[in-house]
Image (cartoon, rainbow, N blue to C red):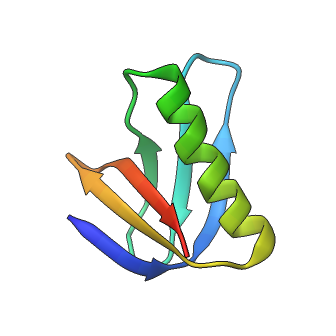
Amino acid sequence: MWYNNKTVTRTYTSKDSQNCHASISGISGWKKIKTGAADGVTNVFVILCAAKANGRPVDVYLVNNQIERATLR
């Protein structure tokens, strides 16, 4: 399901492979970026960090309570 025009409130990553999370306004709890493709996880995380750093909204697509896609507005 798409959630449009949201604000990234926090981002988190650790040393563990493909372990990236984000907190998005209007969506409860931390959401993990869906794993499976390292480049895909990195790309989505970069979009979410850019949104947070620059105060820009994002559209995020959640599947099974994980962020699968994101677009920077």
Taking the image as shown, residue 61 lies to the left or right of residue 49, namely left
To which quarter of the image does residue 27 belong?
bottom left
Look at the picture and state if 11 lies above or below 33.
Answer: below
- Residue 56 picture location, percent across and down: 66, 78
Side of 60 relative to 20 (left or right) = left
Q: 70 or 11: which is nearer to us? A: 70
Quadrant that contains the C terminus: bottom right
In percent of the image, x 70 and y 56: which residue is there?
49
Q: Residue at x 78, y 73 (%)?
A: 54
Q: Which quadrant: the N terminus?
A: bottom left
Q: In the rendered view, tell whether residue 58 sits above or below residue 33.
A: below
Residue 32, given in percent of the width and then of the height, sits at: 44, 43
Identity of the residue drawn at 43% across and 61% down:
29
Left/right of residue 46 with respect to residue 60 in the rendered view: right
Find residue 55 and report its horizontal and vertical position in percent: 73, 79
**Count of numbered circles in the view:** 0
Foreground residue among 69 and 34: 69
Q: Quadrant of residue 43?
A: top right
Q: What residue occupies the far right of the structure in this picture?
A: 53
Q: Which one is nearer the viewer's eye here, 47 or 27?
A: 47
Residue 12: percent from the left, percent from the top? 66, 45
